[in-house]
Image (tube, grey):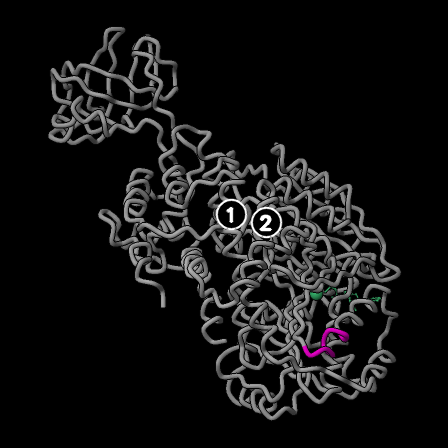
Amino acid sequence: MRPSLLDPLFVPITSFTGIGPKIATLIARALGRESAEETRAVDLVLLPPHRVIDRRNRPGVAHAVENAIVTLELRVDRHQPAPRGKRNIPYRVLAHDETGDIALTFFHARQNWLEKALPVGETVLVSGRVEWFNGRASMVHPDHMALEKDADDFPVIEPVYPLTAGLSPKLLRRAVDGAVASLPALPEWLDGTLLRRQGFPDFAQAIERIHDPRDGADIEINAPARRRLAYDELLAGQLSLALVRQRVRKLRGNPVRGNGSLRSKLQAALPFRLTGSQEKAISEILTDMESPERMLRLLQGDVGSGKTAVALFAMVACAEAGGQAVLMAPTEILAQQHFTTINALAEKAGLRVELLTGRMKGKERAAALSRIESGDAKLIVGTHALFQENVSYHDLLLAVVDEQHRFGVHQRLRLTAKGSAPHMLVMTATPIPRTLVLAAFGDMDVSRLTEKPAGRQPIKTVTIELERIGDIVHRLRDAVSNGRKAYWICPLVEESELSELMSAEQRHAYLAAEFGSLVDVVHGRMSGVEKDRAMQDFKSGKTRILVATTVIEVGVDVPDASIMVIEHAERFGLAQLHQLRGRVGRGDEASSCILLYKAPLSETARARLSIMRESEDGFRIAEEDLRLRGEGEVLGTRQSGTPGFRLVDLEAHRDLLETARDDARYILNQDGELATERGHALRLLLYIWRRDEAIRLLQAG
Ligand code: ADP
Ligand code: MG
């Protein structure tokens, strides 16, 4: 149970004045929370402003620079309401200081309100942007206005928070202020020496400093307050991961010892030779699983490096030992695909593979569940349906999670916490840099596939302006008539899934005019069966061009597809481009990737595309990605931080991450149950950062 000390931080934001359910929903969206109810005061407290407005500049009317934000001390001369019935003429309030005259301009104004706010003959403070027109100064809708007697409340340095459309900055700021004001006094959870060495303020001071900055420097990424809070966030993450790990280690492992019989059959059935790094990874995994400690291992390998085969060997070892193994994929398409490939190989080794997805219903589902429960099903492939309440396993020895970046940390925790304590293998195609591995997984053993399977051809990558789409269609016609296959990826549309799908359908129609029934489309709104059929037709060669939204991003395997067109490539992140490109170049044919972009390119987009042209090395691309993202751009707004984090920016806070990891390790060595005074304070930290799932593990253990 959450300590009641934290209650003020966990009131729903709707309890603040002015925040109704509608606005709460907007705020929830801006903060990436699931729902309005799930959005609590603490979320606002931990929302960093991304810039400040400095209202200290008081030049006087005559010296105000066009478009600069200034604060003016004015004497109000006269109100000039719009003529009756003419709503499009603004309401003007004329005022002056000793340097000159200015008109304060309001559209759709309420007269009584303005007469109270700006009484004739009084001195007032206003702040906003000054515009000049024909030598006359005006300020349209000042950001702030106050009577002289209320000047103390006038904002001087004003924090600005990232917004979602439809949410007014004033409302958000008011809600944040309310939340910050309700912050209870909390004990320090950080080590005193660390605080001094780093020059960190305490939690309350840090929160106050970022929401009430003295100037822009206070909210910079490396300001002490920001670093303190980033450290808290990192420590909460590392501590919860370390708790999971501690718990996993405590549960009795299930040593998996096979006799090699199925393994050699599988080896014989493979249509290719394993690469050296596949062999190495398999042996690391088998060694881990033989030991009495539970395995917690990450298998990292670039797209196409052959992770599935590695997983299959691990799974077969479990079957050999008489137990079960599951492989969990993030989407139905992928589960289906894994099932098909794994089943084909496993059959040769005399094994059946069971499929379980959310799509299966009725008798079919019941039959699969009962084979899983009885232990008849040894190798099981599926989606997250594999870990729903109603699925019970006979003797689950291994859980393999594919393409982890689609699963949240919490899902992973739940999986690990599942009673049967299977060994865990997490596979990722994103060649995550070391720092990110540490941040996302804590101390985890890692196997890496560093070689590509033999016979792979390099992929030729070119960038072409979207205007030349006609040339591309022309070239595709030649390619298709030579029997080649192409993916055509439609642009990422941030605003809505619906427009993404419309763009896919439009592109499909456009290409169909040229290619007829040789082109097909697959997108997220299609039913599972429709998607399967589209994938199947493309695989079999019935269709030759597959238009797709990013649903195909992860893991799809059509070895003879050799052309990848990505439309509006400038909208995609580097990691995503690399993933998409990895869908081709899997067969022995030379492949190409065409990045269609819309000019003009931003600085960062240009850098991304040129890295794509230069390199196929997933690790290099991932490092560059992190670097570029750190600099952030997206429509000119500085997007700070690292995805998945609120205050942490891994580029800037790399040093803190290492310290947090060591700190977490040290804490649990000294105080494994978080039972000391500092331990209790650290529990508060975990609640504040919504890592309390880890605390439940403590209590269960
Ligand atoms: P990923 O690591 O992206 O999940 P997959 O496991 O889907 O890669 O493998 C990509 C393709 O490479 C598959 O068609 C697979 O059969 C093939 N493959 C895997 N290992 C080898 C190998 N050692 N030699 C040749 N082809 C391989
Ligand atoms: Mg894969």
**Residues rendered magenta in the picture:** 286-292
Confirm whether the magenta stretch covers residue 287: yes
Nearer to me, 296 or 458: 296
Q: Residue at x 23, y 10 (%)?
A: 97
Look at the magenta stretch and give its main secondary structure.
helix
Q: Quadrant of residue 481?
A: bottom right
Q: Nearer the viewer, mark 2 or mark 1?
A: 2
Nearer to me, 52 or 103: 52
Nearer to me, 24 or 482: 24
Query: What's the amino acid at mark 2?
Result: Thr
- Disc 2 Cβ-to-ligand 1 distance below 8 Å: no
Give SS at disc 2.
helix
Q: Is residue 628 left or right of residue 502?
A: right
Numbered disc total = 2
State the mark number for residue 231. 1
State the mark number for residue 456. none
